[in-house]
Image (tube, rainbow, N blue to C red):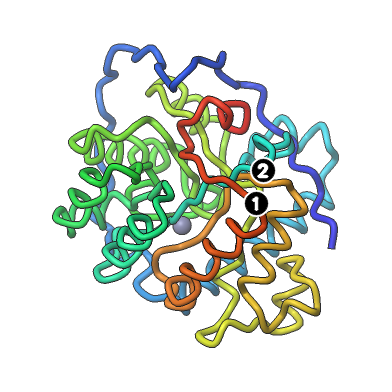
Amino acid sequence: MNTPIRLLCTAALALAPGLALPQPPAAPLPPAAPASAASAPSHAHAHGADIRAARVRGLAEQMNRPPDELKQSCRFESDIATPPMAGTVALSFDDGPEPGATQAILALLDKHQVPAAFFLIGAKAERHPELAALIKAHPLALVGNHSWSHPNFHDIPVARQASELSRSDTTLAALEAPKLFRYPYGNASCESNAQLQQLGYRIVGWHVDSCDWAFDKTGSIDAHEAKICGVEKAHREHFVDHVVSAVKARHGGIVLMHEIHPNTLAQLDTLITRLRAEGFAFAPLTHPGFLTSLH
Ligand SMILES: [Zn+2]
């Protein structure tokens, strides 16, 4: 299935080497949203259903709305139309920190000496400060911001979007995290894009969606999900084959995965080994070669 090329909001920042972005003076924080950690995905199944619903709605919207209107709406920022640094992969893991999973991923980064970014949900980072600190202290890991409680920004009012961003920004600032933001479900708004720009953030999408949310515990995906995700029939039983094939098709790029899916953890060792055997190198998102992939 061909996913329509996403039209990007034009509010891109001038590129600066090493993400040394000028920091605007801190704006007064809007009132924080109520602590809604309970709305963060608590287990992989509910999370998969949420992503599926967001994906189906997004695809329908992109096919049904005129291109000009879509462009002006800034709603879809996360599929990257520009090519990545060729032959290079940047791994990224969303929705943590997750007890057990965070440590396991960090151990694999050590084993293979590959870097990765962890886009943390602010409320979970607050609940598991020891895990957030582990990621921060790891020389191969980067902390990114994945909102405060993981709402779909297409479904919440602008004021709540603002508090989601500012509250997670405040929490993660304690980790001295680089200003990298990934939208939950990839769903953006013009207002939030502007706020992120003001806070000094770059928006991080992905070249390759591993679709790990749709693969079950044994690493297979059903026909319907495969269609939504663009997983080839031959790869429906093989998560690693799907991701390697998708990375090869894009000649590398930012790969989206999640901390909360056991199959991702179970296959990560093999996935890294396979990507390396295919000749791919690994780099962190802050590598200058990935700057053109950030918004
Ligand atoms: Zn997420």
Q: Nearer the viewer, residue 290 or 174?
A: 290
Q: Quadrant of residue 69?
A: top right
Q: Which residue is depicted at the point 20% across and 52% down?
A: 134
Element at label 1:
loop
The residue shown at (38%, 76%) is: 43
Q: Is residue 58 above or below residue 30?
A: below
244 on left or right of 288:
right
In the drawing, does residue 204 fall left or right of residue 102?
Answer: right
Q: Earlier in the sequence, mark 2 or mark 1?
A: 2
Disc marking residue 87: 2
Please state the horizontal and vertical placement of residue 133, each as a whole percent of the image. 18, 48
Which residue appears at 55% of the width and 83% of the height?
Answer: 216
- Element at label 2: loop
Closer to us: mark 2 or mark 1? 1
Q: Amino acid at mark 2?
A: Gly
Q: Which residue is mark 1?
A: 279
Residue nearer the viewer, 189 or 141: 141
Quadrant hosting residue 237:
bottom right
Q: Residue 269, position in %: x, y?
A: 46, 68
- Few, some or many residues within 10 Å of mark 1 (<14, 14–19, 20+): few
